[in-house]
């Protein structure tokens, strides 16, 4: 009988940073190549795989060298976030004086969630056209990001600097700017993923949830930033059009 087809492990390779032309240092003219292989068995990523990869690279890339010998296969786990019904959680606060307070359920009142099309009923009226500048989103927007299983979570907010009118205008601008469509433009890795955006105007904030960005969770992710800890700072570095009056 014919033997069954061999199992093919999942693999990926990527190089960064991309060297610029006429680099003024050897490091600036170099790139790091990273190859990742995932399989349910350690056999496909043993010596046979690493030897072939190293020998091929040595014979193909001028100036190729390694930062370290190929590592041994290591196990990875797959997990995902789940939801717990609010009724099974008692929100309890212990104050500094030792007193205990049980916080009741919040009122069922939320703003509409942005849709995939990027359109949503806005709590703010439309404004006339104004002059804008292309500047980093982080010019006055702060961020915190991280992984929740296979999803990436990004909190964006405007800090209150004591000027109430400017703060309110910046919060309004941020709430209008961040939609699923705009998130996909600013984070191209999310182009084909489900993105949810939640407005938190009373906190001057927007919460972004990108489903599937870390893959099967941090223990199985092959991303450069598997825990999405740097995702918020990268998003802050992206350039957007900011109204002159907000600066």
Image (cartoon, rainbow, N blue to C red):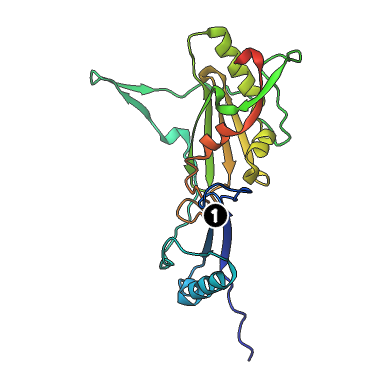
Is 175 left or right of 64, judged from the image as shown? right
The mark tally for this picture is: 1
> How many C-alpha atoms fall within 10 Å of the one at disc 1: few (<14), some, or many (≥20)?
some
- Give x and y (percent) for residue 112: 65, 26
Q: Quadrant of residue 167?
A: top right
Q: Which residue is more in the foreground, 150 or 52? A: 52
For residue 10, say whether it is visible.
yes
Q: Which of 244 and 215 is in front in this view?
A: 244
| Residue 8, horizontal then vertical, whole percent | 59, 72
From what the image shows, is residue 108 above or below residue 86?
Answer: above
The quadrant of the image that shows the C terminus is top right
Up the image or down, 98 lies above or below 3; here it is above
Residue found at the very far left of the displayed protein: 98
**In the image, farthest residue toward the right:** 129
> Residue 6: image x %, image y %?
59, 78
Q: Is residue 113 visible?
A: no
Near-viewer residue (80 or 231): 231
Left or right: 119 in relation to 104: right
Q: Where is residue 198 in the image (x, y as percent from the top left)?
A: 59, 29
The residue that appears at 47% across and 46% down in the rendered structure is 227
Instruction: From this view, report whether residue 195 is shown above or below residue 163.
Output: below
SS class of the residue under badge 1? loop
Q: Residue furthest bottom?
A: 1
Q: Quadrant of residue 61?
A: bottom right
Q: Which of 157 and 113 is in front in this view?
A: 157
137 vs 59: above or below: above
Dot 1 corresponds to which residue? 30
Write the residue at 42% across / 36% down.
Answer: 88
**Quadrant (top left/top right/bottom left/bottom right) for the N terminus:** bottom right
């Amino acid at each position: 009988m014919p033997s069954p087809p061999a199992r093919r492990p999942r693999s990926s390779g990527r190089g960064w940073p991309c060297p610029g032309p006429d680099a003024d240092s050897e490091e600036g003219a170099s790139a790091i190549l990273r190859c990742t292989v995932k399989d349910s068995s350690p056999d496909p990523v043993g010596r046979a795989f690493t030897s072939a990869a190293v020998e091929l690279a040595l014979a193909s890339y001028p100036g190729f060298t390694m930062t370290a010998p190929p590592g041994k296969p290591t196990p990875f786990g797959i997990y995902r976030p789940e939801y717990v019904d609010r009724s099974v959680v008692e929100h309890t606060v212990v104050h500094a004086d030792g007193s205990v307070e049980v916080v009741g359920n919040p009122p069922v009142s939320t703003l509409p969630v942005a849709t995939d099309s990027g359109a949503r009923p806005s709590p703010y009226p439309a404004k006339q056209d104004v002059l804008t500048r292309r500047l980093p989103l982080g010019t006055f927007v702060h961020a915190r990001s991280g992984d929740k299983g296979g999803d990436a979570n990004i909190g964006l907010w405007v800090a209150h600097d004591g000027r109430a009118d400017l703060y309110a205008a910046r919060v309004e601008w941020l709430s209008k700017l961040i939609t699923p469509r705009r998130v996909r433009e600013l984070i191209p890795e999310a182009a084909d993923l489900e993105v949810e955006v939640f407005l938190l105007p009373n906190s001057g904030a927007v919460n972004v949830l990108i489903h599937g960005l870390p893959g099967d969770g941090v223990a199985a992710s092959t991303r450069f930033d598997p825990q999405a800890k740097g995702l918020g700072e990268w998003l802050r570095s992206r350039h957007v059009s900011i109204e002159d009056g907000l600066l």
